[in-house]
Image (cartoon, helix red, strand yellow):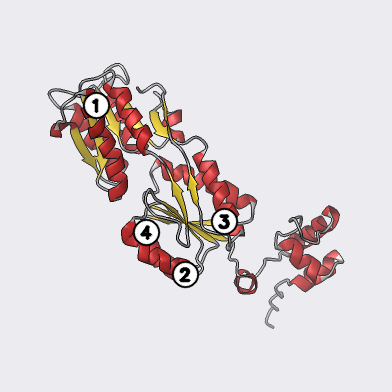
Amino acid sequence: MTERVPRRPTIKSVAQAAGVSTATVSYVLSGRNGNAGGPGVSAATALRVQEAARALGYRPNQAARAIRTGKTDLMMLSLTMISDPWSLDVSRAVGSAAAAKGITPMILADTDWRVALRRQNADVTFIDAADREGDAELLALAAQRQRLVVFSETLEPVGFDVVRSLAGDSCQQAVDHLCAKHSRVAALTSSEHSPTTRSIRFDAYTAGLERAGLPFRADYVATYRKDSLSAVEAATALLLNPERPTAIYATTDYAAIGAIHAAQRLQLRVPEDVEVVGIGNTTEGENMTPSLTTVGPLGFFDGLAAFLVTRAASPAAPATVLEFPWQLIVRQSA
């Protein structure tokens, strides 16, 4: 005799168990209860519905809900380098804020966001690197009602939101901070930056040398690829220079952290033998020993997370620019 497969619990069975209508169950389990302007359900009734759903093992049919409401409860994060402390901080802050609202974050790690967004819809997608070459693709996706939030120094909010870092002045402050104390200041720059980001961050270095009356030296510039080991190797090459630099300006926090590790492996003290400054104001840089002097915005990660959650709930809101002013944050490394 074949064993009968138990029927999957439905909204109707949850309603019967809780002694309420199917409309009430749908309302409570959709997460809308308590929203401004909604009919509302008492806390006791909501708890009864939730307990009945748990007891029966009810799980909403997400595909059907997406068709009915136009919402997927998914948030996509396109992060160019997932091991970068900046990306990890974005992931942590967004994951926490999204979970509180019943949204599932999906990370596109080292993946082409264009391909992913053609295949999957999300309530909102954050893209951490885009330049003018991607304009047409962004406009096409926005025209398909994809809610996009793009980190860019140059793009305008045409159908999608733009997050700006306003990093230029602070990067120059970082270089000035080093040049005021040192005549041998080196730079660690990435081959993976977008052209605009590379220009803003590296131009701050060359302009800072000029302001300080210091010569530009090609042997004081090292380029790293998209991984922390490459940053350590590039910093090591700088520190093995016969005329060793006494300060390093790195165009990301993860490269600056790599420079500190490289110095420590070479038995050099930071900041006594070499000072190091990064860019990004990441948690890892703040918590390491010595703590990393950096430039970046205060409250950026929580602010970005809150903005993404708001955008996921308001797909029709007009596109805007969200600006995060940066500042020099002096800690132990310089």
Q: Residue furthest bottom?
A: 1
Residue 71 placement (x, y as % from top left):
60, 66
Judged by depth in the image, the label closer to the viewer, 4 or 2, is: 2
Judged by depth in the image, the label closer to the viewer, 2 or 3, is: 2
Could you say whether the residue bearing mark 3 is in a helix, strand or loop? helix
Image quadrant containing the N terminus = bottom right
Which residue corresponds to the image point at 34% horizontal and 61% vertical from the top-left? Answer: 134
Residue on which disc 1 sits: 211
Judged by depth in the image, the label closer to the viewer, 3 or 4, is: 3
Q: How many marks?
A: 4
Q: Amino acid at mark 2?
A: Ala
Q: Amino acid at mark 4?
A: Thr
Q: Tag 3: Cα neighbours inside 10 Å, few (<14), some, or many (≥20)?
A: many
Label drawn at residue 311: 3
Which residue corresponds to the image point at 82% horizontal and 59% vertical from the top-left? Answer: 41
Q: Amino acid at mark 1?
A: Arg
The mark nearer the N terminus, 4 or 2, is 4
Query: Taking the image as drawn, is residue 10 in sight?
Result: yes
Q: Are marks 3 and 1 in contact (CB under 8 Å)?
A: no
The mark nearer the N terminus, 3 or 4, is 4
Residue on which disc 2 sits: 143
Judged by depth in the image, the label closer to the viewer, 4 or 1, is: 1
Q: Amino acid at mark 3?
A: Arg
